[in-house]
């Protein structure tokens, strides 16, 4: 007998329909899985056989052929265990298929027949809805994640018995439900706040500008000046995630297996802090079956690169494409996938190997050659793609002892939100989300300056030897500063402040 079960596969961060065909015929016993299965899928036979036996069902007698269609796409992971088991029980006439076509099914089976969670359930649920299937059977642990998708009924099951009873109408279960609005509001809170930061008003202003225009930032300063503390608080001043952004971000984390048990949605902006020993694959993603790396896991949030010169040069250079295009494309012999990477890059570094070059209180022990070699680890093209360079000096003692609270994240977030709203109104339906993403045409249209301001910019370009890319970055940052000031046109003081955010580049890199 032939049984067909709907399931879902994941490629990159997108899912696509899979049909699990289970055929049992009276012939020499044997089992074959076809349809480009990987090792985990081939091993599913052992898990499914044990689960069927331990749930008091019988393993079908005869020749068993399991086909995962479409057959020209590689299948990987244990999510096909449950649909294969259901298909075999139907093909062996142990359960009826009364409602089988109403469901799509995904889940990993334990040997005792319990159903374990799998990765990528959110994109699976979206694909199930788009395919017109009315209901989705998922592991209990994945139910909140799948239930955020409107338009389908999500049924959580804890065992093979539950799934078999559901498709044969021997068991009635209530579909899982979540309150999406409550998830985004109740969980959108952070444990840190900019009010904790003592001093560093200049750095806080620079980070406000960066958040308002989604500009990349490089902080340079001695050890203990608060660079990491500042970076960790940047997500707290970014606008709250919309539902669309939350779904997009959660899809990446779902595929990577980064969601916590029972977690339905990411309600806060991601903050990823890879170690400087991270490989290229860990940073941007990859593998034989490509998975997202830290860059994509920071999508719609912040990627913090501490001790920037200590990263491998090749790893840093891989960031150039996602910074420019907000996507990462990974090509393999049998597939090509694209991961989203709309990130705000925040980097931090010391001014020299010992960390005290230019410090008024401590002497630098490094030779000029050591300093030059250390700074050269960060390439010019990468520096050009970082809009704001800010010096973060040592915090004076009087600021550390100051009991007055500094400006908090809530007040800074209001400024950022107002500036983002002006940008949204300006760009309309152009598809540009922030000033940092302006095209050359939009720069010419929205970044006009008067004669006096143009003269200042021309002198700065000549004196600092800025590149053409630096020129456009200065105009973008100046446009953001004007937005924070609620100004329709870029004025002299806005460009002067934007130029100031590029001078550290020439101070440390000559």
Image (spheres, grey):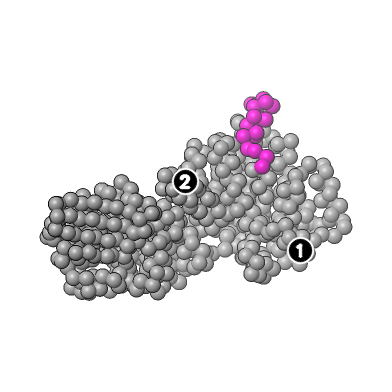
Depicted 255 relative to depicted 319: above or below: below
Residue picked out by circle 2: 332
In magenta segment, residue 93: no
Q: In screen coordinates, is 166 left or right of 485? A: left
Q: Is residue 67 left or right of residue 338?
A: left
Front-lying residue, 319 or 218: 319
Q: Earlier in the sequence, mark 1 or mark 2?
A: 2
Q: Secondary structure at mark 2?
A: loop
Question: Looking at the image, which is closer to me, 16 or 227?
Answer: 16
Work out whether 421 lies above or below 254. Answer: below
Residue 386 coordinates in the image, percent (x, y): 65, 47
Is 367 one of the magenta-colored residues? yes
User: Dot 2, crowdedness within 10 Å: few (<14), some or many (≥20)?
Assistant: few
User: Which residue in the structure is indicated by mark 1?
Assistant: 445
Is disc 1 placed on a helix, strand or loop? helix
Comparing labels 1 and 2, the label whose residue is closer to the camera: 2
Q: Bin the neighbour count of mark 1 within 10 Å (Cα to Cα): few under 14, some 14-19, many 20 and up.
A: few
Residue 386 in view: yes
Find residue 475 and report its image quarter.
Answer: bottom right
Q: Is residue 39 left or right of residue 440?
A: left
Quadrant, the N terminus: bottom left
Segment tinted magenta in the rendering: 364-381
């Amino acid at each position: 007998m032939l049984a067909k079960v709907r399931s879902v596969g994941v490629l990159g961060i997108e899912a696509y329909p899979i049909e699990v065909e289970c055929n049992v015929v009276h012939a020499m016993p044997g089992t074959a899985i076809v349809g480009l299965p990987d090792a985990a899928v081939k091993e599913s036979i052992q898990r499914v056989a044990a689960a069927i036996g331990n749930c008091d069902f019988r393993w079908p007698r005869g020749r068993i052929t399991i086909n995962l269609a479409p057959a020209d796409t590689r299948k990987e992971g244990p999510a096909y265990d449950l649909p294969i088991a259901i298909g075999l029980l139907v093909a062996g006439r142990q359960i009826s298929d009364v409602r089988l076509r109403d469901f799509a099914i995904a889940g990993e089976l334990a040997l005792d027949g319990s159903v374990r969670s799998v990765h990528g359930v959110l994109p699976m649920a979206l694909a199930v809805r788009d395919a017109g299937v009315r209901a989705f059977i998922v592991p209990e642990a994945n139910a909140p994640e799948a239930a955020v998708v409107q338009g389908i009924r999500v049924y959580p099951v804890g065992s093979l018995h539950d799934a078999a009873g559901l498709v044969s109408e021997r068991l009635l279960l209530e579909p899982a439900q979540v309150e999406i609005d409550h998830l985004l509001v109740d969980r959108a809170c952070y444990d840190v706040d900019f009010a904790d930061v003592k001093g560093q008003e200049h750095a806080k202003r620079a980070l406000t500008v960066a958040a308002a225009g989604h500009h990349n930032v490089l902080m340079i300063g001695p050890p203990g000046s608060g660079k990491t503390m500042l970076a960790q608080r940047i997500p707290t001043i970014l606008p709250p995630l919309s539902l669309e952004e939350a779904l997009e971000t959660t899809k990446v984390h779902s595929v990577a297996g980064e969601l916590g048990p029972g977690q339905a949605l990411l309600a806060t902006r991601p903050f990823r802090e890879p170690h400087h020993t991270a490989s290229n694959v860990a940073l941007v993603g990859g593998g034989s079956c490509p998975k997202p790396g830290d860059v994509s896991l920071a999508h719609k949030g912040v990627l913090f690169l501490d001790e920037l010169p200590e990263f491998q040069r090749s790893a840093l250079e891989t960031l150039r494409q996602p910074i420019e295009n907000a996507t990462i494309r990974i090509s393999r012999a049998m597939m090509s996938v694209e991961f989203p990477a709309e990130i705000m890059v925040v980097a931090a570094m010391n001014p020299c190997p010992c960390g005290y070059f230019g410090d008024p209180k401590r002497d630098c022990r490094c030779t000029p050659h050591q300093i030059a070699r250390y700074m050269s680890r960060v390439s010019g093209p990468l520096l050009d793609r970082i809009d704001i360079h800010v010096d973060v000096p040592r915090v004076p003692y009087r600021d550390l002892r100051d009991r007055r609270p500094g400006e908090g994240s809530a007040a800074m977030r209001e400024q950022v939100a107002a500036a983002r709203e002006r940008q949204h109104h300006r760009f309309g339906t152009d598809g540009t989300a922030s000033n940092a993403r302006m095209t050359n045409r939009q720069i010419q249209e929205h970044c006009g300056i008067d004669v006096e301001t143009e003269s200042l910019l021309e002198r700065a370009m000549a004196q600092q030897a800025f590149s053409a890319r630096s020129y456009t970055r200065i105009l973008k940052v100046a446009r953001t500063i004007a937005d924070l000031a609620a100004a329709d046109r870029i004025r002299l003081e806005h460009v002067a402040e934007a130029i100031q955010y590029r001078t550290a580049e020439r101070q440390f890199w000559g």
